[in-house]
Image (cartoon, rainbow, N blue to C red):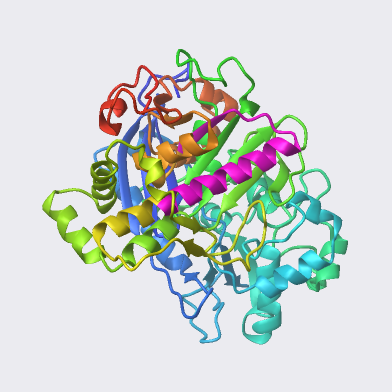
């Protein structure tokens, strides 16, 4: 992220609040991650489909990781701060104090998490209105968006929460408020998760129709009536209290935030791929789709004109890349599903023991085990009689049906390690087939996608990446800087600092090569292993 007007000694802090942890990175203006830190955060699950967090706990974690990454750095050279976070709902009272979103009255649990499905009935009710705004969420309102959650609070916690609430924030906006004292919302959050239109504003008739007319009467003061483009500076920068807590200088630029998946998309969708003979080379950026895969997965495709895809969120204007329309597909449980399947198997203790003995992660061990038992067949053929339907937490896209359940077909009486490895493989394949379903739905609606760009925790698993290449029939590009989400957050801070004219300019000045690992469809004639291919960034790896 080099600027012609600066010596290469300035830094930017990116903070990413994921589902289970907060991470921070110190990034220099060349786009290099100089320091990294991670801190776990709490999750409460008091009953099925209810997932809650604490805004105090999350902010404390933000402060811990920021202080770690800036150790030994002249804080006067840190020019900007950017946040991204999950699209969870934060509730504060009129004095900005946490307000309980549960019947127990536990105010420290004041966040309804993105993956919380308590508002499924409210989402169904909203979808049944067939209001025009639903055209911009794939035609169906998801319980993972904010309007159903707000309606659930009004219907179930009217006196204890709804009537006492002063502010409803998307988590990324809560973080920028905490840092600056400014309640302005990012266009990314309100457009993608709250039905705001960047062209037409709030739609009064929608909120009245679904039963939240009081928000209209209050002129949207509780959910936002001032909006900022992602990357633009918020207020006058870091306020004294936040500066002290984070260990940063008062007044440094703080950027309007992004949702975490959107930060990942921003961090890698514009990557340079010259010299790899990819189908997207010398093609518009709209030929790419960014897959951000962790606890869940998001599929981010952009277009120059709006594309309406049934069951896929969007189109949203300028929600990720300024000037482009965004469609966002997704799978509600991917990393979470793999973990659930593996840890719930009878052979999991044996797997843990053997992985520890070989000084490997459980997934690296499973990948190696599959390589041993596949013999002469391609690994994908091991599951010819075993199939998983992966919608254990409903289907976000493109079926848009949260009532769907998971299924496994082809089980035997076996409970050994081979059986666990095959079930793990079938689960990974099912997730990849879900990606294929999403991509094909987007292509059928008018997108011209030919290359998959992948980042996030699951992109570090070679089997997960290879199955996506095999099953989608597309090359998969991995970023040289694996922490693309944090890079995206730091890009926001760099843009807010005014060291760069725009988000596009920040990306354009990034000097490090952006692609190293290229995965293509499965051909095993040459017998290369995943590890040997990963060590050859200069060319495609054919398995």
Question: How many numbered badges does the structure rendering display?
Answer: 0
Q: Is residue 344 above or below residue 7?
A: below
Q: Is residue 538 above or below residue 415?
A: above
Residue 193 visible at all: yes
Residue 236 visible at all: no
Where on the picture, by quarter, is residue 472? top right
Residue at image coords 42%, 52%: 426
Magenta highlight on residue 342: no
Where on the picture, by quarter, is residue 512? top left
Residue at image coords 40%, 64%: 411
Residue at image coords 50%, 43%: 292
Q: Is residue 161 above or below residue 204?
A: below
Q: Nearer the viewer, residue 434 or 88?
A: 434
- The location of residue 170, given as percent across then percent down, is 60, 59
Relative placement, left or right, of 275 versus 75 is: right
Where does the magenta region start and end? 426-454
Residue at image coords 77%, 37%: 306
The image quadrant where one finds the N terminus is: top left
Magenta region's main secondary structure? helix
Q: Nearer the viewer, residue 399 or 126?
A: 399
Q: Residue furthest right?
A: 205
- The location of residue 541, given as percent across then percent down, is 37, 24
The image quadrant where one finds the C terminus is: top left
Q: Residue furthest left?
A: 357
Magenta highlight on residue 434: yes
- The location of residue 276, given as percent across then percent down, is 45, 16
- The location of residue 172, given as percent across then percent down, is 55, 53
Q: Is residue 210 above or below residue 190?
A: below
């Amino acid at each position: 992220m080099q600027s012609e007007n600066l010596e290469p000694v300035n830094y930017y802090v990116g903070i990413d609040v994921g589902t289970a942890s907060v991470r921070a990175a110190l990034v220099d203006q060349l786009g290099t991650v100089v320091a990294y830190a991670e801190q776990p955060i709490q999750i409460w699950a008091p009953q099925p489909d209810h997932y809650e967090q604490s805004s105090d706990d999350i902010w404390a974690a933000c402060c811990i990781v920021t202080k770690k990454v800036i150790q030994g750095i002249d804080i006067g050279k840190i020019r900007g701060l950017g946040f991204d976070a999950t699209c969870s709902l934060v509730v504060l009272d009129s004095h900005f104090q946490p307000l309980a979103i549960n019947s127990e009255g536990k105010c420290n649990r004041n966040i309804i998490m993105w993956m919380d499905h308590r508002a499924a009935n409210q989402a169904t009710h909203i979808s049944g209105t067939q209001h025009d705004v639903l055209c911009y969420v794939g035609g169906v309102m998801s319980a993972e968006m904010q309007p159903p959650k707000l309606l659930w609070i009004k219907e179930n916690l009217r006196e204890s929460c709804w009537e006492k609430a002063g502010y409803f924030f998307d988590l990324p906006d809560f973080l920028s408020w905490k840092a600056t004292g400014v309640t302005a919302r990012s266009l990314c959050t309100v457009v993608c998760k709250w039905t705001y239109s960047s062209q037409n504003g709030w739609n009064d008739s929608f909120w009245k129709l679904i039963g939240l007319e009081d928000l209209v009467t209050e002129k949207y003061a509780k959910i936002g009536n001032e909006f900022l483009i992602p990357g633009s500076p918020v207020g006058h920068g870091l306020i004294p209290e936040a500066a002290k807590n984070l260990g940063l200088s008062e007044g440094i630029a703080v950027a309007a935030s992004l949702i975490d998946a959107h930060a990942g998309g921003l961090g890698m969708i514009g990557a340079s791929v010259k010299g790899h003979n990819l189908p997207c080379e010398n093609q518009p950026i709209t030929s790419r789709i960014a897959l951000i895969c962790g606890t869940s997965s998001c599929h981010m495709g952009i277009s120059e004109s709006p594309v309406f895809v049934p069951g896929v969120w969007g189109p949203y204007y300028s929600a990720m890349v300024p000037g482009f329309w965004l469609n966002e597909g997704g799978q509600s449980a991917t990393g979470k599903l793999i973990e659930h399947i593996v840890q719930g198997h009878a052979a999991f203790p044996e797997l843990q023991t053997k992985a520890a003995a070989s000084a490997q992660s459980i997934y690296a061990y499973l990948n190696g085990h599959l390589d041993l038992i596949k013999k002469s067949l391609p690994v994908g053929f091991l599951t010819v009689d075993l199939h998983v339907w992966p919608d254990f937490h409903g289907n976000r896209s493109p079926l848009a049906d949260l009532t769907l359940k998971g299924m496994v077909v082809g089980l035997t009486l076996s409970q050994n390690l081979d059986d666990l490895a095959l079930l793990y493989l079938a689960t990974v394949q099912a997730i990849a087939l879900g990606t294929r379903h999403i991509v094909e739905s987007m292509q059928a609606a008018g997108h011209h996608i030919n290359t998959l760009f992948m980042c996030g925790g699951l992109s570090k698993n070679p089997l997960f990446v290879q199955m996506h290449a095999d099953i989608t029939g597309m090359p998969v590009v991995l970023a040289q800087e694996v922490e693309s989400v944090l890079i995206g957050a730091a890009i926001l801070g760099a843009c807010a600092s005014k060291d760069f004219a725009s988000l596009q300019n920040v990306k354009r000045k990034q000097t490090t090569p952006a692609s190293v690992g290229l995965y293509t469809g499965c051909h095993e004639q040459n017998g290369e292993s995943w590890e040997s291919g990963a060590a050859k960034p200069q060319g495609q790896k054919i398995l």
